[in-house]
Amino acid sequence: MSTAGDRPRLRKVDLAAAFGAFDERWSPKIVAALNGQHVKLAKVEGDFVWHSHADEDELFFVVHGRLEMHLRDGVIVLEPGELLVVPRGVEHKPVAPVETHILLFEPAGTVNTGDADTDRRVDADWLD
Amino acid sequence: MSTAGDRPRLRKVDLAAAFGAFDERWSPKIVAALNGQHVKLAKVEGDFVWHSHADEDELFFVVHGRLEMHLRDGVIVLEPGELLVVPRGVEHKPVAPVETHILLFEPAGTVNTGDADTDRRVDADWLD
């Protein structure tokens, strides 16, 4: 488990090596902490669930693959090298048509499924 | 200018296009805001100054080039695809032996030169 009290670790993170260290889909791994926020990596593929976060803005950065961010009024497609912030309160459903590697930046303690009642919820742990 | 009150903008950012939109060195541009934090892009080359930030942890992610983070007890070298968090209070001097493109995550209002008395200070503005 991790908390907002996580202290930064003065060591570099190689994203390629970190993505190579796990295979689960839709199960973000924490790789860095700063200012009460976490940097997480996730491998995603297929559809996630509609949800929103009442108090957290959430950044998605695509490293590999393609992420379609479904919003109630449209879809924003992210290719590698593109990022998007989904503001708190905005309903969204991430969809990855192929295996996709994403970096997330969000407050420590953010739950992946937000307000949704679903078995897709997982607690993020540090990738060590 | 920008403040911690900046609201997230629901639009994607293409890092390659954003880096193509400015040429100044050591002058971070804000491209996204979330949770009182800013995502900034900077082109850097050569030596910066020794400094620290009393209250801000600072993340450096290298997109292109090579960043040598000098610390009082050593150097951590970052290649593209690698990131490092420098915790608050830790003295550091970024050095880029070649033109290098970096992404920064840090609290809104973070001053690039921290506690250093230097003319290298610049106020970050949004890249629009």
Image: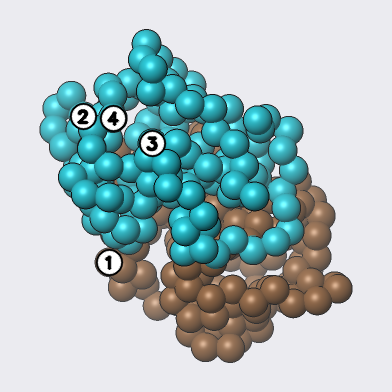
Chain colours: A brown, B cyan
Q: Does dot 1 land on a helix, a strand or a loop?
A: helix
Measure the alpha-carbon separation of dots 4 and 3. 8 Å
Q: Chain of mark 4?
A: B
Q: Chain of mark 2?
A: B
Label 2 or label 3, whichever lies nearer to me, is 3
Check disc 4 and report the residue beneath it. B48
Horizontal side of A48 relative to B101 (left or right) equals: right
Q: What is the three-letter code of the residue carrying label 3?
A: Trp
Q: Nearer the viewer, residue A89 or B104?
A: B104
* Contact flag, marks 4 and 1 (Cβ < 8 Å): no
Check disc 2 and report the residue beneath it. B71
Residue A42 x, y percent position in the rendering: 48, 68
* Contact flag, marks 4 and 3 (Cβ < 8 Å): yes
Q: Earlier in the sequence, mark 4 or mark 2?
A: 4
Label 3 or label 1, whichever lies nearer to me, is 3
Which residue is painted at 52% across and 88% down in the image?
A98
Q: Chain of mark 3?
A: B
